[in-house]
Image (cartoon, coloured by chain):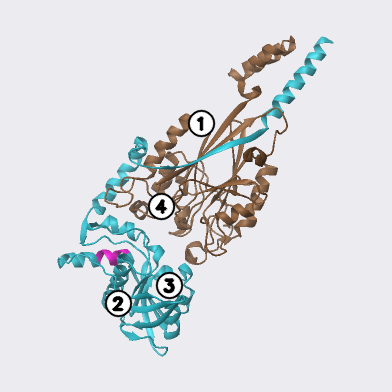
Chain colours: A cyan, B brown
Amino acid sequence: MRQSFSYTLLITWVLIAVSCKNHFVQKSYEIQNISVTEEQNVLDSSIVRLYLPYKNILEKDMNRVISFSEVEMTKGKPESFLTNFLGDLLLNEGGNVAKAQEMGIVPDLSFFNYGGIRTSLPEGEITVGKIFELMPFENEMVFLELDGKQTQEFLDYVAAKGGDSLGGARFKISEGKAKDATIGGKPISEQEKYWLVTNDYVANGGDGLDVLKGRKQFINSKFKIRDAIISSLEEKQKNNEKLTAKIDGRFIVE
Amino acid sequence: MNTKKINRRIFIRNVATGTAGIALGAVPFSVLANNDYTTITILHTNDMHCHIEPFTGTNERYANKGGLARIARLAKIQREKNPNTLLLDAGDMFQGTPYFNYFKGELMLKVMSAAGYDAGTIGNHEFDNGLQGILDPLPNAQFPLINSNYDFSDTILDGKFPGYKVFKRSGITIGIYGVGIELKGLVGQMHYENTVYNEPVAVAQKMENFLKNEKNCDLVICLSHLGLKYRNSTVSDMVLAAETSMTDLIIGGHTHTYLEKPIETKNKAGKPVIVNQAWWGGLVVGKIDFVFERTKKKKIGTYSQVLES
């Protein structure tokens, strides 16, 4: 009798223990975003040991200074030092690559997608590593021929984005459209065809640039955009030319 | 013989002799204590973009800040304070420093594993070297990459990513699901091939219901790479928060959003849900502590009543 009572008690306790085990009630929470800083957070030594051999391989390449910039270049809209600098650089380098590869064309327009520009360029020394940060993607330089209508549609896309990294064209941004556009200083014409130099990412419709999929001709140089930037900077350095950039009113917001 | 067994023996003996008072004292505290609070700490990052090291000294905005090497230490300290800590990432681990260009995803996944990540999800930049570029470094990840809305069944990545993961910490059940952003127009088709994107809201609703009601999770977390919010109606974390009703925390990424503190908002059922994002490059770590009370009663209140009081 006493024993059966004990067992009943035991079973009850076990039941409570089991049922308790699965019942949690969330009482409260605390939320916080912690800034990760030099002062507050030291480096984890085991992590450092893990990446150090990799770092040594990289550093040999990355710390090489290839250029000097007179100004700090950051990206912004509608125009900025960085977006204008890169747009112009791509138009120029595109011309060089087209010539070197005997494509028989000269690009009229150049375009970098804004989101693909991943960092700023500092005033002073520019290293190879900085260009890797700026343009980390393995994108290739491609050439697209667009008809006049497609070109206008493409410029409208840039206008709708409130400006972008574009070389070779100037226009007014009016109600999200490119108004009074000129290409190479001449008004855009529906009868003309234009060559655009850009990266394979946008050429394949990346960033919503479906208009580029309808191009009339397509040439892939297989030359990496990042390598184009590096070689352009090295070329300038050879001529003792420092990097500079300007806001030149290529986009006027109405 | 472990202590649990010893305690259970004492417990049985004491009950058998009718000395219930002694029995209470002898049972492990965690099983029977009345006001037993357990804290689950969630630490999270997003858009690390291979920032294994802090930003370099020449970087004008972020000099010497951020990086996985600092976060690893921070997470270790947090785990020492509270072993019930989960370290999570919301995608875009890849692309952004030469470590990716030179070593692809290998080093990043190795370092994240060593830093003790419990789970991550897939961001759009994970596709930057194509599906093969995800498959090759994947064996280096000693943590699951959770995704519930990409269908990889017609690709080489079939079966590589769990749709959810359930963690148990001190008896508390934590369910995690993951949603990724629409790849069309964002990632070259040659890079995602036949990956099918399923609409995240419907997937999230299905997953939260599954985790809450079938897996009996006490806490449901969404790892999202949709982006915090957009001006248009594009699906985002804020859309997800408003359209779900059992998800407690949405950890986001993609938009590289800096938030002074996590966002507290209401879900479809009018209950609180937390949405957070930790900037990028390891510049911020989000920290959410959920305090649970273990109770003898069936339920002393609903989640919302408790939180709103």
Dot 2: chain letter: A
Q: Mark 1 — residue? A: B83
Whole-number angstrom distance, CA of label 1 to CA of label 3: 49 Å
Which residue has dot 3 on it?
A203
- Dot 2, how many residues are within 10 Å of its Cα: few (below 14), some (14-19), or many (20+)? many
**Observer-nearest residue: A32 or B167?**
A32
Q: Which chain carries label 4?
A: B
Q: Name the residue under label 2.
A: A98
Comparing A197 with A174, the one in front is A174
- Callout 3: chain: A
Q: Vertical placement of B60 versus A42: above or below?
A: below
Residue tagged 4: B49
- Is the magenta region chiefly helix, strand or loop? helix
Residue at 59% x, 49% y: name it: B163
Q: Kindly identify which numbered label has been placed on residue B129.
A: none
Q: Is mark 1 on a helix, strand or loop?
A: loop
The lab-note entry on whether marks 4 and 3 share a chain reads no
In the orientation shown, which residue stands out farthest toward the bottom? A191
Question: Contact, CB < 8 Å: mark 1 with mark 4?
Answer: no
Which quarter of the figure is the N terminus of chain B placed in? top right
Q: How far apart are marks 3 and 2 (CA)?
A: 17 Å
